[in-house]
């Protein structure tokens, strides 16, 4: 079953900071190389000392692409940060994916086209005509995106960061309120990589048919 086609690819070199657009990406078992490969760690000046510094701590962090600027901004707020490097600093799974159709009812509720960039996915998929599956209906499914095989792990539960405007305009708390009240707090899916390969903008997203007619598991 064709679910849609890949519209955009994003990598986020430093966790919670500005992403970069890619036309293609090699995807390994650990996700996209260089994605969340560094993070800002709080050394002092905040109750989360020893943990990562996120959008929840600075609602404009996602606008910054330079680590030095992030360190200086934090210092001005009385927070001492260090840059940590590693393979990946993920919240949960190596790959995140968003289908544009999931935004439609949210957009109707708030009265404008909500920017998909608020949700910071690795892959944005433009839904095929007739697409109607929700996140929970895809849990456990095997998806093929270009040469990459993905197993859907879970819906993504969202936090206050989705209220921040991608270009720095005023925050909109209605975005998270709608998602919490009408969508179980979910927007998008986490996936594990079961076959490494390369994806390119325009590649189809295909859902493999269940074996022996088995149904796809649902979650609540």
Image (cartoon, rainbow, N blue to C red):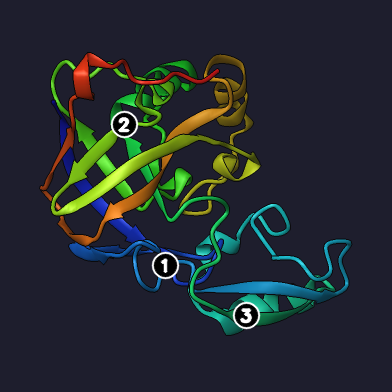
**Foreground of the two, 23 or 208:** 208
Q: Give the mark toward the camera: 3 or 2.
A: 2
Q: Are marks 1 and 2 in contact (CB under 8 Å)?
A: no
Q: Is residue 127 left or right of residue 70?
A: left
* Numbered badge on residue 35: 1
> How far apart, in angstroms, are the residues tagged by discs 3 and 2?
34 Å
Residue 140 at what x, y percent from top left? 38, 31
> Closer to the N terminus: mark 3 or mark 2?
3
Residue 106 at what x, y percent from top left? 45, 22
**Foreground of the two, 213 or 196:** 213
Quarter of the image with the C terminus is top right
Q: Is residue 79 left or right of residue 69?
A: right
> Closer to the N terminus: mark 1 or mark 3?
1
* Numbered badge on residue 152: none
- Res 100 → quadrant: top left
Q: Give the mark toward the camera: 1 or 2.
A: 2
- Which residue does the numbered mark 2 point to in the structure image? 141
Residue 39 at what x, y percent from top left? 60, 72
Q: Is residue 28 visible?
A: yes
Q: Is residue 127 left or right of residue 10?
A: left
- Which residue does the numbered mark 3 point to in the structure image? 84
Residue under the point 69% across and 59% down: 58
Q: Are marks 1 and 3 in contact (CB under 8 Å)?
A: no
Residue under the point 65% across and 40% down: 160
> How far apart, in angstroms, are the residues tagged by discs 1 and 2?
24 Å
CA neighbours of label 1 inside 10 A, class few (<14), some (14 to 19), many (20+):
many
Q: Are marks 3 and 2 in contact (CB under 8 Å)?
A: no
**Foreground of the two, 192 or 121:** 192
């Amino acid at each position: 079953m064709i679910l849609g086609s890949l519209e955009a690819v994003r990598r986020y070199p430093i966790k919670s900071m500005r992403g970069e657009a890619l036309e293609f990406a090699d995807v390994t078992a650990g996700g996209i190389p260089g994605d969340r490969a560094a993070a800002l760690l709080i050394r002092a000046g905040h109750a989360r000392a020893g943990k990562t510094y996120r959008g929840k701590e600075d609602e404009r962090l996602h606008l910054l692409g330079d680590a030095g600027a992030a360190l200086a901004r934090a210092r001005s707020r009385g927070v001492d940060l260090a840059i940590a490097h590693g393979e990946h600093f993920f919240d949960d799974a190596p790959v995140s994916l968003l289908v544009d159709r999931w935004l439609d009812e949210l957009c109707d509720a708030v009265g404008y086209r909500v920017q998909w960039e608020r949700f910071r996915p690795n892959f944005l998929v433009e839904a095929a005509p007739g697409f109607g599956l929700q996140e929970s209906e895809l849990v456990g499914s095997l998806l093929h995106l270009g040469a990459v095989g993905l197993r859907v792990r879970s819906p993504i539960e969202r936090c206050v960061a989705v209220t921040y405007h991608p270009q720095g305009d005023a925050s909109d708390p209605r975005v998270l309120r709608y998602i919490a009240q009408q969508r179980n707090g979910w927007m998008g899916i986490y996936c594990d990589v079961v076959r490494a390969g390369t994806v390119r903008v325009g590649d189809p997203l295909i859902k493999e048919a269940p074996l022996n007619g088995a149904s796809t598991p649902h979650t609540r």
